Image: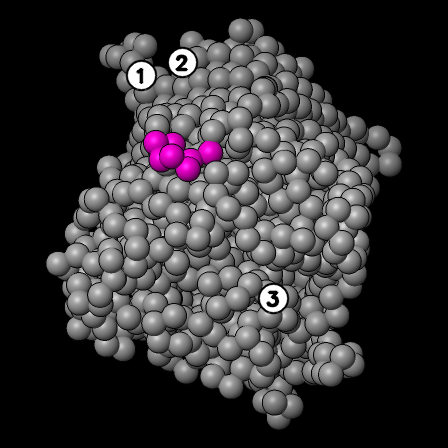
Amino acid sequence: MINNNKRHLAMAIRAINTLAISAATLAFAPNVLAQEEGLDQLEEVVVTGIRAALAGALDQKRDANNLVEVIQAEDIGKLPDQNLAEVLENIPGVQITRTAGVGTGVQIRGTSSNRTEINGVSTVGSGAGRTGIAFEDVSASMIAAVEVVKAPQAKTIEGSVGGTINLRTIRPLELKEMLAAVRVQGEDSSLSTDGIKPRLSGTWGDMWETDAGEFGVVVSASYAESDVTAFRPRADRDNLVTSDGGAASAQSFDFLPIQFFVQDYDNLEFKTTNFAGSFEWAPNENVKLYFDTVLNDQERLQESSRVQASGVSRLINESIPTDFETVDFGSLDGQHIGTIQAATKGIIQTTADGRYPNLRMSTDTGSRKTDSQIFRLGTDWNKDRFSGRVEVSTSSSDTLNPTFDTTINFLNPNEPLNSSNENGTPFQYDLTGNSLAFGIASGEANAPSKAQLLDPANYILRDVNQAQDKVENREDAFKVDFSYDLTDSMPFITSVDAGYRYNVSSSLNDEYSSNVGLRTLAESPTGDLFAGILTAGPDNFDAADGRDLFVKDFLVIDPEQVNSDPEGVLAVINAAIVANNAITGANRAPISSPTSTTTAYFDIEEKTNALYAQANFEHGIFRGDFGLRYLETDVNSTGNSVVNGSVTQATTKSSYDFLLPRLNVVANVREDVLVRAGWSKDIRRPDFNDLSTSASFSTSPNPPVVIGNPDLVPEEVTSWDLGVEWYFAPAAVVSVGYFQKDRTNLHVKTQEDPASAPGTGYRDTTAPCEGGGVFNPIADINVFGPTPGVGVCVPRQTTINGAGKTTQTGWEFAAQYDLSNFEDELGWASGFGIAANYTIQKFSGGDEYLTASGRSVDVFTALGATDVRLQYPLFDNSEDAYNITMYYEKYGLSARARYTWRSAYYTEDFGSTSSYPWSFPAIQEARGQLNASVNYDVTDNLALGLEAVNITESSVRQSCVNEGALLCFEGLTDRRVTFGVSYKY
């Protein structure tokens, strides 16, 4: 590696020297406005209206040498959408993923492996990933423009596969006059019961000319609360009843029985505070000094609950469905799997001993509190043909993830008790009509009544899982850039840029946890001993789709009390344990607060030196740039391992280097037509947790134990771009673009599953796991053993550099046009306009596969399919997506309606589990969403606004094994309406 470093460094220096000689002068520098400032010289600070924002963004894209997409604010603090992810969805080739209906993830050209900057400064996220700050953590109200760099230049910081997102704030010295604006709004969710939530934002800025030069200041602040809710029903049918197996439930055909039910109520409450401030001072026309700060405080409180029908799998040979559907599993990896019948309706009665199935309720409060800070200080200067920038910056994110999850069992008073802390409740289910519905079989004689379901004495404590996980991410950077202007000095090269950047990136993860599982009747306190922290669960699970069948009446440990006073809730639980010990004679110890989980600790630091050189050219119809970027990175990964109760800390060191050539060419073949071409190389660094030697354990037996790999090296990405843009009218364009991305050194997950006994599915419950996997000492044995308890073998997962290559290709089509030039002919109708895009993407290649295991193998084998496998997919990648925006702007009225649609894609976000259903990731089915907004200018200063997100309450549906195969999960999301008033001076 050291020899490679020296060889590549020598190559980089020779390349830079070559550019310098060709310029006949200094070659170390970018423009005064370096990559971090993107295209600021084109930006209008105050852009008002939809049409002006679209036109300004189009001008920036047209004038850029590389492929850059731009979205400008329509007015001070007003981007097209409230959520930044939703804003980015307006761009061709950009798709987003949502959590409980809120845009949280962004995919550029099919991949989430991108970078996010604010004013050119790298941001860091709240977890172990590399994409940067979470989009829900930044208020769109403080952003003046958004850039997406799809084709990098040599000056572009490395680390993206799809593109680099740069969020720009207003620059003070570009102000022509004082600006001041304030906006007050309220947001309402159709599924939330907490009422209207406030949104407040304001911006002030001014510029002064003095004897000491020009001074400028801009400050923006915002506060927003948001309450989002989604209902997520889940039905597992990953088991098999054969026609010839002798089961009482057997039919004349093989079928998939009911394995598990979940009624998941997700509620997230966001409180976001943002501040952005910029100060600029230009003592003369040759020097400018600047200081920027961006502060973000995000508090996301989870107040979710789950109702589970557990132990259903123990009745698959007894419970007889009344209705079935035909499931076509299609083909995987060229192998046709076939069709099978699956249960859709029926009643699941209790076992003869009254022990199963069980009604179980959980409270989930996995919250996040993040404090992010970004500072940058620098100077721009120019003298004659020379210009440059020197800048220092720091970006940090400190996150605390408090969790207090609890589970209580319902003890049906109409069934006998046993030594365990659970007994049977009958269930009814109806999975027809493309819906997953289940509830208590109220018509059965042993079904509990509403009064019994709301009686604390009929509940008993099962699990208390606490955590206080801490994540500290940081990047400190220093950069120096220079430029030399060669205009009129050379026939082809217009300027030569070069620079140096040094950064230190670090990620620290420390987990504090306490996981207690109670499995016997004697040690588990009943709900009347902790009734003060119990509350009725949400009873509006029918609000999204009007379903009749669901569990309406139940109790949970109050999530609001848990979030506001976790110590008080724990004290109540411990008092209940003491009282129960006195009643039953048990000796259950009190539950402690979370303590450090030494096996999960890691501290990783990277130091990177980067050089670049770039020549910018223009000759005839051609313009563009070409150059090289060279980088060296040293990695120190510190983690803990625990052997025989002894903690050992070890530090692993590694390094790598890359030489990244980049080329962009634009040909103005006609005054209104240009052709673009680009070729570049980039890298994608591993996520920090993938580099860690540490591991963390779950109380569930389903998720794998993930163990990092400190020898991972970055993926390598080679990209090609080709496009044509026709600017056929003012503020109008029709464009088509093609891209291809080849990735090697792929980061792929490999998983070793534990052995399971045929028929029963039981796993080894003692260490070591000779049959595969890894022993999890705190996992609930659940259905993987004959008796209740904790400690079972679970899957072991790690990330490696795959040997193969993947290829992403795609076509991007876009059009933009308005009727403003026809005002004389059309009158009021000249206010209409349209912007639309369509993206087609394909993914292929890779040598890694996911292989069927466990119960899914039994089903596939019964259908005659053996060794079923799936080539490792590109997650969150839809092959087809489109976006259509219709708008109207005239007479002070500004209205917009946007419909987005994307086809099915593989996802790792499914239901209330983190393990792959049927051994493979779920497929999120095709979905569209309609958003709209209306604003009216009452006066030049006062405006009223109304915005709606997910107007039609479009639902999410996820299938298992293949698109359109077996419906496994649903997501019933809310409609959010925001209304308000804005005033500007």
Residue 890 disc label: 2
Against 163, residue 373 (above or below) is above
Taking the spot 60% from the left edge, 61% from the top edge, the residue there is 699
Q: Residue furthest bottom?
A: 3
Taking the spot 58% from the left edge, 78% from the top edge, the residue there is 766
Q: Tell me the residue that label 1 is attached to.
A: 830
Against 612, residue 892 (above or below) is above
Look at discs 3 and 2 and give the one toward the viewer: 3
Instruction: State the extent of the magenta-drawn residues as a range.
Output: 442-448
Q: Position of residue 654 (x, y in %)?
A: 66, 83
Residue 790 disc label: 3
The amino acid on which the numbered mark 3 sits, given as a three-letter code, is Val
Disc with the residue nearer the chain's start (3 vs 2):
3
Number of residue marks:
3
Q: Position of residue 330 (x, y in %)?
A: 19, 61
The amino acid on which the numbered mark 2 sits, given as a three-letter code, is Lys
Q: CA distance from mark 3 to mark 2?
A: 67 Å
Q: Position of residue 127 (x, y in %)?
A: 64, 57
Q: Is residue 374 magenta?
A: no
